[in-house]
Amino acid sequence: MPARPLRRVGQHSRASERAPRVRTGEVLWRPHPHRVARSNLASFMRWLELRKGLRFDTYDDLWVWSVNEIEAFWEAIWEYFLIKPSVPYTRVLKSRRMPGAQWFCGARLNYAEHVLRHERPGVDAFLFAGEAVPLSRVSWPELGGKVRVLATQLRKLGVKPGDRVVGCLPNVPEAVISLLAAASIGAVWCGCSPEYGALGLLERLAPVTPKVLVCCASYRYGGKRFDRMAVMQKVIDNLPSLRHVIQVPQAGQGDDAPLLRHAVRWHALFDHPDVKPDAFEFEQVAFDHPLWILFTSGATGLPKPIVHGHGGILLENLKHLSFNFDVHPRQRIFFYTSTAWMMWNFLVGALLSDVVPVFYDGHPAHPDASVLWRLIESAGVTLFGTSPAYIRMLQRQSYAPKEQFSLPQLEALTLAGSPVGTNCMAWCYEHIKQDMWVSPGSGGTEACTGFVGGVVTLPVRAGEIQARALGCAVSAFNDRGQPVLNEVGELVITEPMPSMPLHFWRDPGDKRYREAYFERFPGLWAHGDQFRLNKRGACFVLGRSDAVLNRHGVRIGSTEIYRALAHLDEVDDALVVNLELSRGRFFMPLFVKLRDGVRLTDDITACLRARLAEECSPRHVPDRILQVSAIPYTRNGKKMEVPVKRILLGVPVERAAGADALADVPALEWFVRYQKRQTDYRLG
């Protein structure tokens, strides 16, 4: 007797949370000609024609020039965005070698100085809100004044160029001020989120030997206050390089709140006359002087400490925000992020363009799913950035923002952090706003930007990332090191970019850096993502390469499986891995989280297998389907396919993934127990 078909969209009471089914490549949105004409891309192309005598009729023509003539392209970016060095560069690019390319040799400048050049009275620099804090404004004079005072105090505390100032702070204004103050004097900023445990914080902070720590003793999330006194004191006591601790108060706390040992209160540092702009000297540093250290999530091992430079981040942030997000001065943008994710640093960088970033400290669904949408409407947000994981949460709650909010100023929604499927994009149009630009993107902490992303002059097609970013020479490479079209390959970058890492912190001879990105294809950057490119130039990022499902020599992207299951009402979420075992064997289990109250029956299992065979191929059919109560994700919303695979292959959980990388620590415990049973497969 054939298995019954699973219910399709529109056949159950929760159909409102699903979008009508669309095909990959189907056009979901086209830009209005007026939108194209006023775009930053159109302005840049007109500028290139007038100033450089270069005419490009299409985005693809412009992209080809940007990656073939990289010196001319990046020099044009320098000129177009009016970079003001104190000492001019003598050469745009000393070498195209990767790693080791040296950009804008001889130039001296300062990232924070380029932020504060927009300072003027009566104008907002950024907006802020929190669970216990209503929407508030920080003006340019307030931001500039506090940055100069804190920078002056740091200098008095003995902080010199190259010293590390680290922050363990939630997404609050003090974090923005601290980063800019450190950068303004040439110190190196390093930020962490306060929910990490002592071990996770020390793993990140101890190797950078900080001189100053800016931290809080508690934070608020999901309506609860979390005390961090003991954790922070343990961190302080185990950082022998530390000389000073600055404690930031949290909302609702006064000056009588408990104080960490050896700490000075934040407000005490500002009991100091304002430092006028003309009386403050920004430290002038080389183009590649370290600006900050960012850490990867730790989902695939110890977090990588990535060092970025002042000049590279300055150019990349200006370029990507303008051309891939099409945001204009004084427009307001909001990314739901934390200080632990590179998107927070990127959001701070919106200040470079005189764009108004909106920062939010709190849970994205507390007290209910409307909280972020209420902020978006009240703040007049033009661009909202979030993750597919957040959209999945809205779908699970059957929450349609358009039913409560008109969102008149919202023009664009960008999705990043994990692969974006056709259903996710279609749902956004159906349940958020029909007339907006939905632009998935993908990049990495490694360059603090997107390699592929949105292009407002092109149509939006379901399941596709619109194009490769300007200046990003991205290709899909097969195992023989050859570029391929319409095949799943490795995401490879063939030309250097100014914002690529200077190096990893404490990595003699760049050993770890080279092993991470340059071993597979010497001289080329292999990012670690499965990638496909079609003839139109549209892009598909299909998950981590080390999570590739290689069955009988055929590479299968896990995203293909997730996409096939996305329209099934019974399936809430899924995770698939493929285990390469001894003697040429393999085992591919599929783990599914089903809707509340649904159990995995033989009928449902048979239907899942049939769906995968029909929509993908027989190779996509798993060897076993198992029901789990939760799918493990990182704090940044990425499925933990690689750690699960490692656990199932016998790697201890503490080596497979750091606990501080997990959004839900118990979610991995099921997989540990499953591996110990080993009833479905044998390692030996």
Image: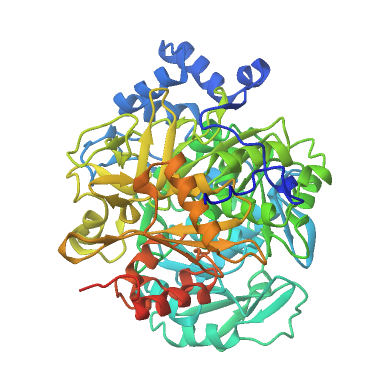
- Give percent across and percent down for residue 395: 68, 52
Relative placement, left or right, of 226 versus 97 is right
The residue at the point 62 percent across, 53 percent down is 392
29 shown above or below 480: above
Please name whichever residue, 289 or 570, is drawn nearer the observer in this view of the structure.
570
Quarter the C terminus occupies: bottom left
645 shown above or below 145: below
- Give percent across and percent down for residue 365: 72, 61
Count how many numbered circles sit on residues in the image. Answer: 0
The residue at the point 37 percent across, 78 percent down is 654
Please name whichever residue, 592 or 433, is drawn nearer the observer in this view of the structure.
592
User: Can see residue 131?
Assistant: yes
Relative placement, left or right, of 68 versus 423 is left
Please name whichever residue, 167 or 403, is drawn nearer the observer in this view of the structure.
403
- Give percent across and percent down for residue 273: 68, 64
Please name whichever residue, 377 or 563, is drawn nearer the observer in this view of the structure.
563
Relative placement, left or right, of 547 versus 355 is left
Quadrant of residue 302 in the image?
Answer: bottom left
How does the figure colour the protein chain or chains? rainbow
Relative placement, left or right, of 461 versus 8 is left
The residue at the point 49 percent across, 26 percent down is 80
